[in-house]
């Protein structure tokens, strides 16, 4: 029995391909949400370039089609020593476990145990980087913004979908420009420069929104006061009229529950799952795999794979193949993913930029990353984006 904890891009991709690659395995997916919501493309949804039906998908249809069991339930604990998962619907044992838990918002880095500040920030300045009601809240926030300063804090790397906060800033700026809403978008970026797709985003900021977007590098967060609407950073202090506050990202709760968080040489938590860089199972437990955004570092050259839907889908397929090989008594052959992201930067005309990452395994065992930026914004890249999304949906949801 293969139990998949989490029905996101990585988990559902693994479930779908296990039917082909491990046909004799019983596959069970545990997912708390009643339907699949795609964070990729959601910035376009904010502007109504796509509707909700483009992002929302039925999860029962692929479960029936590909022959796995889908249980809507909340996972409460993972007991690796007993190879079982506790859920609100009962306990289930596994032979292999795939954790596809995504991320969690680490508000405690800003506020410690101050639950009042955490709840106030989450409710009033949501980040909308986890499928939930926050996406609609951010959409309504942007639609109802009458003017002033809109601040966006970016999580320090590694974080989910690295270029998407810049895309969101462009979407908001285009909305303000088109509707003549007075004000600006202030991007507080802890990094020293825009990355990835730096030249493409910089050109969009400078050429399309020079009077709207204010980009602030090296703006690591020192203190956030959501009640007074003040933020102190390493690059100065800022006040805001409204905000989208993105705290640091960490591996989701299931990885912590399973005691799979890595440790630094000093013994501190890395905040991400410790995994084998090519075989992708947990360090010290080859019956447990981690796929998607919760994965830890895999290379001394670049650290983490991009925490993207494309990588999650690809890794889900890779892990399904690994389990299939093991069940068939075959030698497991290491495989590497690739990555591809498209970002909308202009709403009229609708233009996008893109970035591609390719990977190869060097003779010393290091995974090498090659990054290819396409910085010239074109309508053709947005069309490629929609084709990419349909290709991905067809792979594991149709």
Image (cartoon, rainbow, N blue to C red):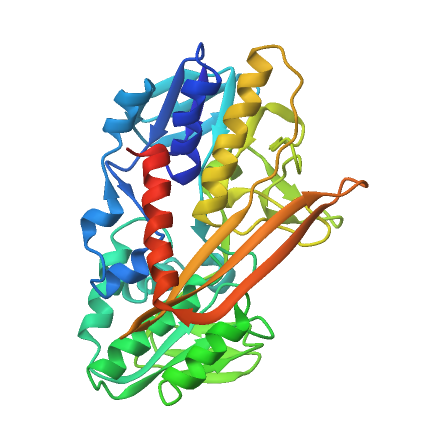
Q: Where is residue 234 in the image (x, y as percent from the top left)?
A: 57, 79
- Image point 60% across, 75% down: which residue? 192
- Image point 23% across, 36% down: which residue? 34
Residues 197 and 122: in front is 197
Residue lying farthest right? 364
Q: In which quarter of the image is the N terminus?
A: top left
Residues 334 and 103: in front is 334
Residues 150 and 88: in front is 150
* Relative height, residue 87 to residue 178 (above, below): above
Q: In which quarter of the image is the C terminus?
A: top left
- Image point 30% across, 29% down: which residue? 73
* Relative height, residue 355 to residue 393 (above, below): below
* 242 lies left or right of 256: left
* 22 lies left or right of 57: right
- Image point 19% across, 71% down: which residue? 143
Residues 97 and 255: in front is 97
Q: Where is residue 46 in the image (x, y as percent from the top left)?
A: 25, 63
Q: Position of residue 396 (x, y in %)?
A: 36, 33
Q: Is residue 105 visible?
A: yes
Q: Where is residue 120 in the image (x, y as percent from the top left)?
A: 31, 64
Q: In which quarter of the image is residue 322?
A: top right
């Amino acid at each position: 029995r293969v139990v998949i904890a989490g029905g996101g891009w990585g988990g559902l991709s693994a479930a779908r391909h296990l039917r082909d690659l491990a046909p004799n395995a019983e596959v069970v997916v545990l997912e708390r949400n009643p339907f699949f919501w795609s964070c990729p493309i959601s910035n376009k949804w904010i502007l109504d370039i796509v509707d909700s039906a483009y992002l929302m998908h039925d999860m029962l249809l692929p479960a029936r089609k590909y022959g796995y069991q889908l249980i809507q339930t909340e996972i409460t604990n993972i007991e690796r020593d007993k190879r079982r998962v506790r859920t609100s619907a009962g306990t289930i044992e596994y032979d292999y476990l795939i954790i596809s838990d995504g991320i969690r918002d680490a508000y405690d880095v800003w506020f410690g145990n101050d639950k009042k500040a955490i709840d106030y920030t989450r409710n009033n300045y949501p980040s909308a980087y986890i499928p939930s009601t926050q996406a609609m809240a951010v959409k309504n926030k942007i639609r109802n913004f009458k003017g002033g300063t809109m601040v966006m804090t970016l999580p320090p790397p590694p974080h989910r979908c690295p270029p998407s906060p810049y895309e969101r800033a462009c979407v908001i700026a285009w909305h303000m420009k088109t509707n003549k809403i007075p004000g600006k978008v202030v991007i507080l970026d802890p990094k020293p420069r825009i990355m990835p797709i730096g030249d493409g985003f910089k050109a969009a900021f400078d050429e399309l929104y020079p009077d709207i977007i204010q980009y602030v590098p090296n703006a690591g967060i020192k203190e956030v006061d959501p009640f007074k609407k003040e933020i102190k950073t390493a690059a100065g202090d800022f006040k805001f009229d409204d905000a989208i506050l993105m705290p640091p990202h960490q591996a989701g709760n299931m990885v912590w529950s399973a005691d799979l968080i890595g440790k630094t040489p000093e013994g501190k938590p890395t905040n991400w799952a410790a995994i084998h860089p090519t075989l992708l199972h947990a360090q010290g437990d080859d019956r447990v795999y981690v796929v998607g955004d919760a994965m830890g570092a895999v290379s001394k050259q670049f650290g983490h794979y991009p925490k993207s839907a494309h990588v999650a889908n690809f890794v889900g397929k890779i892990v399904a193949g690994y389990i299939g090989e093991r069940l068939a008594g075959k030698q497991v052959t290491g495989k590497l993913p690739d990555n591809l992201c498209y970002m909308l930067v202009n709403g009229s005309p609708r233009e996008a930029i893109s970035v591609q990452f390719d990977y190869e395994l060097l003779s010393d065992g290091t995974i090498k990353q090659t990054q290819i930026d396409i910085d010239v914004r074109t309508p053709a890249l947005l069309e490629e984006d929609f084709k990419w999304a349909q290709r991905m949906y067809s792979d594991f949801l149709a």
